[in-house]
Structures are given as C-alpha cells and as structure tokens.
Amino acid sequence: MITSELEGLLYGRELDSPVVKVVRALSGHGAVSTSQIARNTGLARSTVSTILADLKRSNLVVEMEARNPGPGRPAIAHSLNPEAGTCVGALLDVDEIRVIVADVAHNVVADLAMPVEREYSPTKAARVVKHAVDTLYKEHSLAHTSLIGIGFAVSAPLAPDGRVMRSSALPGWQGTDFREAFEPALQKPIFADSESNCAALAEMMWGAASGCSDFVLLKLNQAVSGAVVVDGRALVGASGSAGEMGHIVIDPHGPLCRCGNRGCLELYCGAGFVSKMAADWLGRSIPVDEIVTRAVQGETGFRRLLADAGEAAGRGLSMVGAMINPPLFIISGVLASAGELLLAPLRSSYEKHSFVKRDDVDEAHYPVFRTGKFLDNDNCLGAAGLVLRHSSRLK
Amino acid sequence: MITSELEGLLYGRELDSPVVKVVRALSGHGAVSTSQIARNTGLARSTVSTILADLKRSNLVVEMEARNPGPGRPAIAHSLNPEAGTCVGALLDVDEIRVIVADVAHNVVADLAMPVEREYSPTKAARVVKHAVDTLYKEHSLAHTSLIGIGFAVSAPLAPDGRVMRSSALPGWQGTDFREAFEPALQKPIFADSESNCAALAEMMWGAASGCSDFVLLKLNQAVSGAVVVDGRALVGASGSAGEMGHIVIDPHGPLCRCGNRGCLELYCGAGFVSKMAADWLGRSIPVDEIVTRAVQGETGFRRLLADAGEAAGRGLSMVGAMINPPLFIISGVLASAGELLLAPLRSSYEKHSFVKRDDVDEAHYPVFRTGKFLDNDNCLGAAGLVLRHSSRLK
DNA sequence: CCTAATTACGTCGAAAATGACATAATGATC
DNA sequence: GATCATTATGTCATTTTCGACGTAATTAGG
C-alpha cells in the first residue's frame, strides 16, 4: 500500500526532517530535478539523492522525461506519484462547506459545495465533511485508504497550535481545537489554517507566487482580506489579524464598516462597494460578476467603478509597501477577474502614494503586481496543500 | 590569542552552524544555562553541552554563579568572556559619524561622535571611522588585535548582499558594496545594516524586545521610521523600504512631506510636528527634548502636543496591527522619553482604530506597547551587535 | 535528617547529513 | 566525429548531531 508509506513518511517524522523537505519540494512544483531540490531545500545533493532513491523504491516518486534547455547532462525530473494518495481540502465558510479531492500531484479529482445554515457547530461541520468525503470517494471509485489527510480552510484566524483564535464568521468556535474536533469523526490526519492563509498557500505552491516565498495577497471579494507571507510562511499575528488588509482605516471619518470602525479599506475596494455603486447608477441591483464581465466587454461606467476600486486598493497597498515592501503583490478575488482594468489603476495609485518611486530603484527592486491564478477555489486547494506541506500541522 | 579563536569560530563556519547559534544565544542574553540555550536554539542539549565545553576550554566562555528560583539542580550560567574580544559599532548618519566600542558582553567601553560635512563619500567615511577606532583603542589601551569586527548602522536601506539600495540621506552611495568599501581600509570583518534595523536588533538582543522574535519598532524622531521584525529578522523589503512607517499616507490631501507624498504619518507624530506646534504656540522655537521634559514636569500644553502625536502614532500602528499584528510594539526615539504621556493616548488610539478590540481576545493575544530601552544609542549598539550576531554578514 | 520530586548536566553509542570523488550525459567547438 | 565545457547524478567515508542513559544538585515535605 503506497499510501500508508507516504503517510508514514509525511507524518511519522520531525516537521523539518530532510525527507519532509524533499516531499514538500516535490509537492510544490510539478517536476523537479535532484539538484533543484537540493538548491531549494538547502540540503546537500547527496542527501537528496539518497532520499529520492528511497522514495522511488517505495514508488512514491516517479521519474518523468527530462528536457534540456542548456548544456550539461539533462536533469531527471521527479514528481510525486499521483497514485500515491489523495488528499481532501475543505472550506468552512459562513454559509457553505465545500470539499475538494486532489491527488498528491494536486490535480483536482472531485469538487462539491454544500450550503449549510449559518452558525453551524463544529460537530455539524464534521458530519457534513464526513458525508461529503464518503460520497465523493464512492462516486469516483476512490479507495478510502488512499486518503492521506484532510486540510481545512477556516473563515477565522487560527493559532499555530490549531485553535480558533477569534470567531466572527463562525460564532462559538473560539477556542475550538481542530484536531480534537475533527479527528475522532474523520479518522484521518487533520490540518487547518485560516481561509486567507490557505489561499496564499495555494498561490505559493502552484499559482501566481510559485517559487516565491515573500509576497502579499489581497483578496477583493465581498470581504477584503489577504495574507502576508514572509519566508514561505503566512503570518498569523498576535490576535490572528495579520493580513486583514481590508480593515486598514484609510479615513477615520468615513462610513461605518461592519467591523465597527470607520472608513476601512474594504468599503472602498470591496465587491460590496462596486455593486452598491453600480446599483445606485442602474437603479437596480446587479451581481458583481456581471459588472466585471460587462466592464471587460467595454462598458465605460463599469470600467470606471473597477478603476475606482483599484485606485483605493493601490492606496491601501502603498501602506503595505511602506511597512513590508514585498516584492510581489497578488490580487485575487472576484474583482481580480477584471485583470488589467483593475490592476492598471491599482499600480498607478500605488506608485502615487508609495514611499519608493519606480525611478528610485532598479526595475528588479520594484514590486510586481499580478492577479491570482486561482480566483475561485484557492482556499480549498490550499487546504489540500496543507496536507502535503503540513506546515500547519496540528500537534 | 583568544580573539582569533572567537573570530574563527564566528566567521569560519556556516552561518547557521550550531556553534554560531550557541554563540549568538550567548551574545544576546547575559547569562544563560545549557538547557536554556538548547531550548532557544532548538539544538539538542547534548550538542549544546559539547559545544559549550569546547568554548570553555578555549576560554571564550566563562561560567558565572547560578541562582536557583525553583526546585531542581541549579543551572550553570554561561556568558561570553568579556575579554574574548571587542567590537565596534559605527553609525553613519547624515551629518555625523558615531563610533562605539563594546566588549563581547556588550558593555560599552568607549563612545565618540564626530560631526562630518553632509554628502560625505564612502572613502571619507572609512577614513573617519578608521581614525576614530585608532584613537579610541589607543585612549583606552585596548589591543587592536582584540577587535573582532566592525558593524555599520547606515542611514539607508541595505540589501542582504550588503549593497546600498537607495540613498536619500547619503547621496551617491547607491550601489556601494559595504565590504568592498570598508574592508580594505579597516582590515577587519565588516557588517552592515540600516540604521533602523540595527536599532531593532539592539532592542531584540538586549533591550525591550529581549527574547522576543516578532515585534515592530517605531522610532519617533525628527524622522519617523521603524523596523518590522519577523522571526528574529528585520525585514528589508524589495526596495528596502520595509519598516518605513513614517511614510504611510494617512491623509492623501494632507500637507506635503519631504518624501514627496502628502499626509505621511511622520507629519503628525514626528518630533518636527511637535516642535513646530510648540513654536507656533510659544511664538519662538524650542528644542524637542525641552518640550518632553516640560511635559513630564506637568505643563499641560506640551502634554497635549505629545498626546496628539501619540494619537496619530496609534492610528498609524493600528494599520500595522491589521497587516502584521505583532505581539509587541516598541516605541522609541526622542518622543518616547515622555513615557506614558505618549503611550497612553497611543494605546487608546490604537484600540479605537484597530480591527481586533481588546475584548475580542485574551489578554495574552492583545499586543503590548512598550518604550524602547535604548533611546539614544540603539543604532550604534545594534551595529556592534551585528558583529556578534552576524546575521547580516556580508558575503 | 531523610526521602521524594524536580531540574540540570555530560557521556556515549547510534543515526543522519555532508563533502569529496567518480561517473554520466549532453551541447558547443574545432 | 572527437574533445571540451558544463551540468547532473550516485556512492561512501567522515563528520556532525541526536537520544538515551546515568549522575548531580537543589527544594519541599514529612
């Protein structure tokens, strides 16, 4: 049984043991050579070589054909054997629970979203997820034994020890220990992180921040949130509010925000702002994705709305630029599907308000702005990624 | 010769080798036990034990008497032998070069500040520092051979490779490679980091952030700057602007700032703001330290000015709270000598504008605000600290 | 004064990771 | 088509690091 071996390999060891590092490197990128892994992980080539040999012997890693860009012996590309196992990513949202199944090469095998009544309990969530997993594995004729772990993307901040720190979206969950709450029901290794951090993880492992270990993610949905990734790890913060870019106060006398403050960034660049403005203009309500679509098709009114949102977001990010100054900003969420319609004004607004201007530094030292790769299921994917990366492994 | 051994130990090895980790742990805190070092560094007790034995044999480490708080065998306190060597910290400021000499136990042995004409060149700086070092070592009868390295605190951002990234305070320095520029003249290992990051390092190693590896430092001087420390390392940023909290734009229609933007935080909580307001009020200019002194003595007008500055700073920090959410804020610089007069309004303003309110979380999860320990020479001390910690070792 | 509990320390064999060396596979050049 | 330069890979002795065990030094409590 391949899976059990992989499981043992992943979870039986120290968190930062070389084997885990190698598996992590493999799970991140698609096809990597021995030397690349060595460079990425900082391990010696010989160590990686030995480990890879073991993994190949256990059939957890397969070789793929190599391509040769330059001179020198062509590298052998390795990747995790997709048949080595599957993992589940579950999103616990306010009124929806979504479950995806992916193989270890992060191909999404199945996807299921279920509405749930608000303010559901952890017990209820465990039941729903269990049911979904059972159903999906049955439907797709997957062996339950191939499931190596379940990752949760939670709409609440999580402490590194796996406890819910605060709970506005999921009332009553504060203090819940994820492992305690879910492991008994699901009988598999459990991992969890906040929804935003999962999204960031997905972009980092397989998306727009691939191979980049320092960046800031900004998600422009109804809520505006995000994540700050430093050295490959998303910050959590003392109170779990790291990455809450949507609630930077940019005008202390501005309108009231749902969080209780005034003039939060969210009010100026969230999907709510865009649809409210559009509704005022049209005289009727209109879904955000339609606004985006029609803006892309060329309707100038909607374009302007997106530009306004981009302008505000750029101003907010300029503050991030002054404090953290990441080399990469990833803009995600519904509004990001507008692409350059949003990004162009965002960039120029950033430049206008930022401390370091484009001319002050080399091109390479000026931050890059890019839309996310997974605008829809980033959090679920990231949750599945947790299982492979198990950086947020619950003790 | 003890020094050469220490030097070899510090610089002859990999940056993260256990020996270096142990020396680092020792150089940080005053007196530490074997087990404490093991816990702090993550190394096995046995490893630490062996290394310490070596170091003691070489006389680089001395034992101090132990205290026994609880039950159990009392720990043996170790510290670096102050006679094992000295190091120099040099501040390269706009119009001043300051040099301090410290032993490896971070006692300041000598201190010398020299005015220099503005826009001085690296060559000039090297000459001045060399002269100062020679003088100080002669005056205090220190052996030149005991000098194990020179750290620079520079008024400009430095890339991790030791190059000056931008240069507003030190025009013409952009691209300067510190090691190349100073090692030939000074003939000692050279280390360098930005002024703010050095200040943060000093607070982290021996000051208000002792033992804390995640915090944000805010310096309220004429300029308002700071540092963001994550996992024991001060962020640099893509363009070297990480930590520039003074240039967060809090009012896009506010007054013009020296940086070319409008409404930067610095304009509302810097020493410049306070003294300008005081001058308007008094009808004559008055030095900032006098304002602080008289506020402490009870003059309500000056108290109000400091409270206003604190209020603005708190608002700025609330943004940091939303993005990074560090467990500790350290307020430093001239204004910080006002203590609670500044901190109290700062705290309440932070609370007012912050996303997570005090009641939302346990006491332990709410950030702490504290004044810095070294308000005057933090940057020089930190520069000397670089030598011991050599985290910013130039390749 | 004696015992139990607790914490700290150091030694030693076992395990892990590395660095050096030898080998392999390709493109470029003559 | 032979040689060189370049890069990738695997093996193995050496070095480094760890975990387990036994010992030491103290406090609390009877």
Image (spheres, coloured by chain):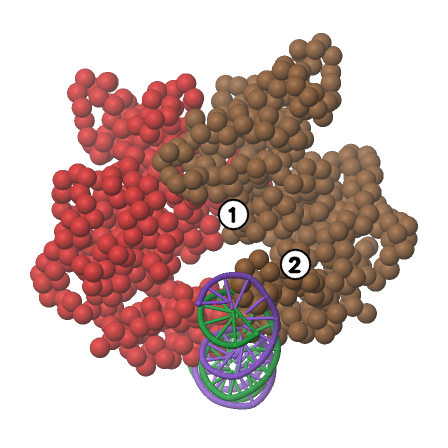
Chain colours: A brown, B red, C purple, D green
User: What's the amino acid at mark 2?
Assistant: Ala
Which of these two is toward me, B64 or A36? A36
Residue A209 visible within the image: yes
Query: What secondary structure is found at the residue carrying circle 2?
Result: loop
Query: What secondary structure is found at the residue carrying circle 1?
Result: loop
| Image side of residue B75 versus residue B133, left or right | right
First-in-chain label (1 vs 2): 2
Instruction: Judge the density around disc 1: few (<14), some (14-19), many (≥20) Cα neighbours within 10 Å.
Output: many
* Figure check: A103 above or below B188: above
Rendering coords of residue A249 (x, y %): 51, 27
Q: Residue at x 62, y 15 (%)?
A: A300
Residue B183 lies in what quarter of the image? Answer: bottom left
Q: Nearer the viewer, mark 1 or mark 2?
A: 2
Q: Can you identify the residue that label 2 sits on?
A: A31
Instruction: Judge the density around disc 2: few (<14), some (14-19), many (≥20) Cα neighbours within 10 Å.
Output: many
Rendering coords of residue A311 (x, y %): 53, 24
Q: Residue at x 10, y 58 (%)?
A: B135
Image label count:
2
Question: Looking at the picture, do discs 1 and 2 lie on one chain?
Answer: yes
Rendering coords of residue A16 (x, y %): 58, 64
Work out which quarter of the rendered image holds the N terminus of chain B and state it. Answer: bottom left
Q: Residue at x 64, y 55 (%)?
A: A29
Label number found at residue A214 = 1
Label number found at residue B13 = none
Residue A378 lies in what quarter of the image? Answer: top right
| Image side of residue A25 versus residue B27, left or right | right
| Image side of residue B110 versus residue B253, left or right | left
Residue D15 lies in what quarter of the image? Answer: bottom left
Which of these two is toward me, B308 or A375? A375
Q: CA distance from mark 1 to mark 2?
A: 22 Å
* Figure check: A122 above or below B270: below
Work out which quarter of the rendered image holds the C terminus of chain B and state it. Answer: bottom left
